[in-house]
Image (cartoon, rainbow, N blue to C red):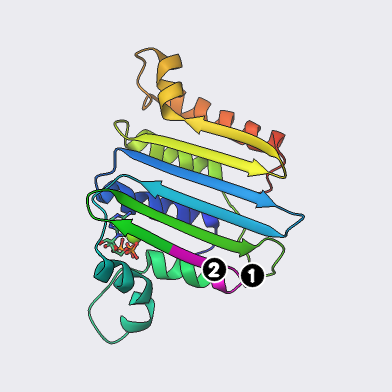
Amino acid sequence: MKDLSLHIIDIFQNSVSAKATKIELVIIENTERDELRMQFKDNGIGMNTEMVNNVTNAFYTTRTTRKVGLGIPLLKRNAELTGGDFSITSELGVGTEINVRFKHSHIDRQPFGDLAGAIVLTATSYPKTRFVYKHQKDGMEYIFDTDEINEVLDGISIQSTDVVLMLKELIDSNLEEIRVKK
Ligand SMILES: Nc1ncnc2c1ncn2[C@@H]1O[C@H](COP(=O)(O)OP(=O)(O)OP(=O)(O)O)[C@@H](O)[C@H]1O
Ligand SMILES: [Mg+2]
C-alpha cells in the first residue's frame, strides 16, 4: 500500500463491516519525538482473543492457504518497517482499538496521500455512522466530526455532491493550516 490514507480506508472498512455506529481516528504527529501515531476506535461487534491473535498473524500464514485478510497485517508490517509498532485490542460486543506508531522521518514511512479524500469518502458513504477524525501536529489540532457537520447541514444530505466537495476542501484547507504534509 502506497499511502497511509489507503490503510485508513481499509481499517475504516473493517469497522463498517463490524457494524460500528461510531468510528474514531486520532492522528498525532510529533516531529520533535519523530513520531507519527494513529489510533483507531470503533464500537462494532469486536473480536475474541483468538480472532485478535489471528488477524495480526495472517500475513505470514496465508501464502499457501486460503485467502485471509491482509489489511491489518500490512499496516502492522509497514509500521514496523520504520521501527514503529502496532497493537490491537478488542472485546466482543464492545469494539476494537488499533494503535500504530511510525518513525516520522523514516525513509520507509509512507506519505499520508489523500487524507481528506479518505475521510470524506468513508464518512459520506456511510451517513448513519458517526465519524470523528482528530489530527494533531506539533500542538496544533483539527477536529472533523460528522455529528457537527450534520448539525450545520440542517437536513441537507451529507451525500449530496456539493457537500462532498465542500467537505473535501474544508478538510484539505484545515490540514494545510496545521501544516500537515501529504
Ligand atoms: N474493527 C474490527 N471489528 C471486528 N472485527 C474486525 C475488525 N477489523 C478486523 N476484523 C476482523 O479481522 C479480519 C481481518 O481483517 P483484515 O483487514 O486484516 O482483512 P479483511 O478485512 O478480512 O480483508 P482485506 O484484505 O480486504 O482487508 C476481518 O475479516 C474481521 O473478521
Ligand atoms: Mg480489512
Q: Amino acid at mark 2?
A: Asp
Give the tally of numbered discs.
Answer: 2
Question: What residue is shown with label 2?
Answer: 85
In the orientation shown, which residue stands out farthest toward the top?
Answer: 154
Q: Which residues are magenta?
A: 80-87
* Residue 81 located within the stretch drawn in magenta: yes
Which quadrant does ligand 2 occupy? bottom left
- Residue 108, labelled with which disc? 1
Residue 98 sits in which quadrant? bottom left
Crowd rating for badge 1 (residues with CA inside 10 Å; few <14, some 14–19, many 20+): some
Q: Is residue 72 above or below residue 157?
A: below
Q: Residue 94's spot in the image, x, y percent? A: 27, 48
Name which residue type carries label 1. Answer: Asp
Q: Earlier in the sequence, mark 1 or mark 2?
A: 2
x, y percent for residue 78: 53, 69
Q: Is residue 69 above or below residue 143?
A: below
Q: Nearer the viewer, residue 24 or 110?
A: 24
| SS under mark 1 | loop
Q: Residue at x 26, y 60 (%)?
A: 47
Residue in the picture at 45% in, 69% down: 74
Element under disc 2: strand
On the image, the x and y values in percent for residue 179 come to: 72, 41
Compute the Cα span from label 1 to label 2.
14 Å
Q: Residues within 10 Å of mark 2 (few under 14, many from 20)?
A: some
Q: Is residue 110 left or right of residue 121?
A: right
The residue at the point 58 percent across, 55 percent down is 37
Residue 53 drawn above or below residue 141: below
Task: Reply yes or no: does residue 57 show up in magenta.
Answer: no
Name the residue furthest right. Answer: 32
Front tag of 1 and 2: 2
